[in-house]
Image (spheres, grey):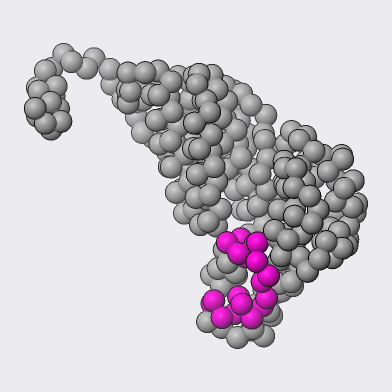
């Protein structure tokens, strides 16, 4: 018997499924809250353990943990696409999704899936909050931001950006400064420093490895640029913040929209 035939038999049995799916409106409002950067609404959803409440969300697997994992993947996919629609850089949105879904491989209990869900949605929400507060740019500038994020590990010049967008370097330089208030080179440097902060906090990579990974001309140049931007050397930053949890209420050096932090865990679902 084919799967289609099996479904037709199940569908014909009126009393096979007494459960009804909840209205999709609630889920879409939740996804939209994430995409809008509405931290309070999303945190409240987590505190109410909505993800843990499986009533009305459908049974995707007979195994409770696998069922919750499937729902996690669906939620992550929906949030990723909505955040992308609301302006998150394409590569950032999908790399973040891939990262969180991969974490399911090492999770074996429902409570762990719930904690990962809360961390994932709060991460997306905080990134979107910062993005929406800082971004009101034209199509060209948004394309610049996209390119810079996707090529952050390379040496990027204004000429590279201009060629990618099909405009002159002088025009793009003026437009970028006008709309963002900073030069292209300063913006690129800041994004690289943001990425360096994450590597210093959440990895054991050496200074030279970080400098090479982010295409600084040398280790000394990386240290100089980092100190000018952050106010302390990379070593002091690592000594102070290595593996420190991200607190979105007070974020003295919390990761920016290109960072990777850990919001407080809580219970769960849309």
| Magenta span includes 81 | no
264 and 199: which is toward the camera: 199
Where 159 falls versus 65 (above or below)?
below
Q: How many circles with numbers are drawn on the protein?
A: 0
Q: Position of residue 254 (x, y in %)?
A: 75, 43
Q: Is residue 231 left or right of residue 269?
A: right
- Residue 227, located in which quarter of the rendered image? bottom right
Query: Which image quarter is the N terminus in?
Result: top left
Q: Is residue 240 left or right of residue 191?
A: right
270 and 112: which is toward the camera: 112
| Magenta span includes 153 | yes
Q: Main secondary structure of the magenta part?
A: helix
Where 170 falls versus 41 (above or below)?
below
Q: Position of residue 111 (x, y in %)?
A: 54, 19
**Residue at image point 86% right, 59% down:** 223
Specify whether residue 41 is in view. no
Q: Which residues are magenta?
A: 148-165
Q: Position of residue 48 (x, y in %)?
A: 55, 21
136 and 186: which is toward the camera: 186
- Residue 183, located in which quarter of the rendered image? bottom right
């Amino acid at each position: 018997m084919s799967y289609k035939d099996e479904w037709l038999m199940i569908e014909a049995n009126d009393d096979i499924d007494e459960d009804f799916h909840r209205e999709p409106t609630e889920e879409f409002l939740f996804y939209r809250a994430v995409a809008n950067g509405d931290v309070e609404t999303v945190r409240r959803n987590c505190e109410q353990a909505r993800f843990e409440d499986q009533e009305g969300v459908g049974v995707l697997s007979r195994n409770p943990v696998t069922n919750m994992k499937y729902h996690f993947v669906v939620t992550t996919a929906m949030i990723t696409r909505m955040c992308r629609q609301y302006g998150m850089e394409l590569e950032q949105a999908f790399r973040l999704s891939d990262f969180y879904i991969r974490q399911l491989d090492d999770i074996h209990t429902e409570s762990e899936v719930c904690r990962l869900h809360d961390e994932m949605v709060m991460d997306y929400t905080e990134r979107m909050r910062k993005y929406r507060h800082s971004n009101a740019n034209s199509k060209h500038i948004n394309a610049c931001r996209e390119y810079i994020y996707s090529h952050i590990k390379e040496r990027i010049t204004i000429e590279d950006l201009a060629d990618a967008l099909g405009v002159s370097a002088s025009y793009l330089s003026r437009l970028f400064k006008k709309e963002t208030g900073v030069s292209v080179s300063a913006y690129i440097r800041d994004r690289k420093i943001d990425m360096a902060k994450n590597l210093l906090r959440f990895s054991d990579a050496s200074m030279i490895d970080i400098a090479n990974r982010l295409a600084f001309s040398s280790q000394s140049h990386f240290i100089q640029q980092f100190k000018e931007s952050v106010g302390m050397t990379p070593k002091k930053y690592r000594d102070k913040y290595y593996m420190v949890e991200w607190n979105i209420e007070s974020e003295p050096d919390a990761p920016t929209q290109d960072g990777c932090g850990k919001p407080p865990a809580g219970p769960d679902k849309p």
